[in-house]
Image (spheres, rainbow, N blue to C red):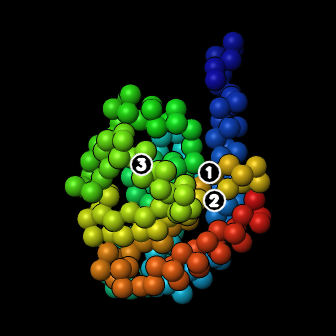
Amino acid sequence: METDKGAYKLGYRFIEFANIVRMDHSLSTIALPYMKALTQDLGETTILSVISDLSAVCVETVPSLQPIKVSSEQGKIVPIYAGASSKAILAFQSEALIDQLFSRKLVKKFTEKTLATKEELIENLDDIREKGYAISDSEIDVGVFSYGFPIRDSKQTVFASLTVSGPTDRMLQKSETEIIEKCQQAVREIEKFL
């Protein structure tokens, strides 16, 4: 922000961004040991994402050691309406946010499996709330299958997600029950510190 003397100083918006970065760093520090354990146990990539306006941002990732794997990187921005990481967060946001996505014409198809109508998306988000987790099969990238789990802060507000992701053929050979139980346990442990 510019002062009356022509100099610049940091405004409140910068402080808000600094707090978001600090929160994300703390979340990463808390979640990283659980993510490493999940990646080792399940053999697939784990991703930690947070909501940012109408997107989700990857704040941490632990890549699989498999030669063929799903990769993500810190700072990667994905739409809030597609993929398990994003939809695990979106399902617990206000309906006004969903309305905004469609009124601003932000929803587009990445693959033939991307849910691009409001009706399809709302039905899927209802299912996610009922189950407590999201599933994505090739919604953003063809051949990628993911499970995403919402993370709540101390006020029970969903602001982040923990996701395990891998090639579709390999993920479908794994025990869905084992993946869900291990991820839900990791989320419960992470939430104890928030």
Q: Position of residue 65 (x, y in %)?
A: 43, 85
Q: Residues within 10 Å of mark 2 (few under 14, many from 20)?
A: many
Find residue 64 and report its image quarter: bottom left
Question: If you read the primary sequence from the N terminus, does the residue marked by circle 2 or circle 1 appear first?
Answer: 2
Q: Disc 1 marks which residue?
A: 159
Secondary structure under the numbered disc 1 in the rendered image: strand
| Gap in angstroms between the C-alphas marked 2 and 3 | 21 Å
Q: Is residue 33 above or below residue 43?
A: above
Q: As shown in the figure, which amino acid type bears the numbered disc 1?
A: Phe
Q: Disc 2 marks which residue?
A: 151
Q: Is residue 16 above or below residue 68?
A: above
Q: Position of residue 155 (x, y in %)?
A: 76, 49
Secondary structure under the numbered disc 2 in the rendered image: strand
Q: Position of residue 187 (x, y in %)?
A: 65, 68
Residue at image position (38%, 75%) is 166
Q: Nearer the viewer, residue 71 or 129?
A: 129
Residue at image position (49%, 84%) is 42
For this orientation, the residue located farthest to the top is: 4
Q: Disc 3 marks which residue?
A: 123
Q: Residues within 10 Å of mark 1 (few under 14, many from 20)?
A: some
Please say if the residues under marks 2 and 1 sit with CB atoms less than 8 Å apart.
yes
Residue 72 visible in this rendered orientation of the protein: no
Q: As shown in the figure, which amino acid type bears the numbered disc 2?
A: Ile
